[in-house]
Amino acid sequence: MTVSDLKNQISNLIKIQEFDYQIYSLSAKKADKPQEIKRLSDAFELKKQNLVLLEKQSLEIQKQRKEKELELAANAEGIKKLSGQLFSLKTNKEFQTMQQQIADAKADGSVIEERILVSFEEADKIKAQIDSENIKLKEEEKIYLQQKKDVESSVKEIDDQLVQLETQRKQIIPEIDPKIFQEYERILSSREGLAIVPVEHNSCGGCHMLVPPQVINLIKMYSHIITCEVCNRILYIRE
Ligand SMILES: [Zn+2]
């Protein structure tokens, strides 16, 4: 390969590298998007926790009320039974004792009734909280869905750009010697999307390690492709 051939090859590699670096960066950006959506969805799920808690409380109140209602029915049944026995008693003392028992049972019943009333008030309060939480969540859901849509459309934009870049890079490939191109692609895939880098201030533009003067001289000779001794990227010097 003549000096001008190699110069030409390197200039084509620089051209294709510009596209490939954009492709690499955009692909990395795209690869982050599913996680971004997951983060949004997790944050939204977390906002539902309060509602879940309130609904649990509401069910617990209903369950406790059912128990109290059963208790009240049993209490009423007991009072009925005692009242029925009242007039079959023989002594005045027995009569008074049973009357006291009935009064005590009625007092217990009032306490249970009071508890049931309170539980209705509590249920109303929770219901109001659930309603307002639902309204809040509807708003949150709207925001979440919009954010998700934005991320999805940015993925689509990236895809469109990638198709364009791929088309542009394909046009350069026939201009590059197949062996050199193979080497370039090998480095590209193992070196974060950068296969050919300029020497700047006597350092490699990829790994920033010093490039020895004799290597710089070799690059200037254009007799063959020179790579960085540290990161193996192809080196060139800006004209
Ligand atoms: Zn290097």
Image (cartoon, rainbow, N blue to C red):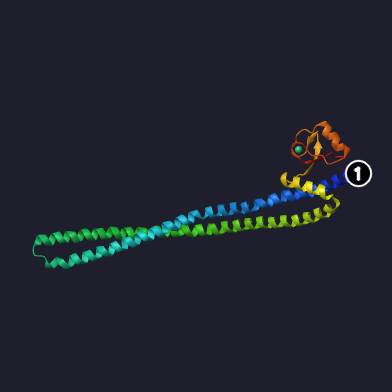
Q: Which residue is disc 1 drawn over?
A: 4
Which quarter holds ligand 1?
A: top right
Q: Is residue 148 left or right of residue 133?
A: right
Image quarter where the C terminus lies is: top right
The x, y position of residue 13, in whole percent, is 82, 47
Q: Residue at x 45, y 55 (%)?
A: 53
Task: Tell me: residue 94, above or below residue 184.
Answer: below
Q: Is residue 117 left or right of residue 4?
A: left
182 vs 127, nearest the viewer: 182
Question: Tag 1, which secondary structure?
Answer: helix
Image quarter where the N terminus lies is: top right
130 vs 11, nearest the viewer: 11
Q: Amino acid at mark 1?
A: Ser
The x, y position of residue 100, in whole percent, is 17, 59
Task: Tell me: residue 49, above or below residue 237.
Answer: below
The x, y position of residue 170, in whole percent, is 81, 55
93 vs 237, nearest the viewer: 237
The CB of the residue at mark 1 lies under 8 Å from ligand 1: no
Q: Residue at x 37, y 60 (%)?
A: 63
Q: Residue furthest left?
A: 91
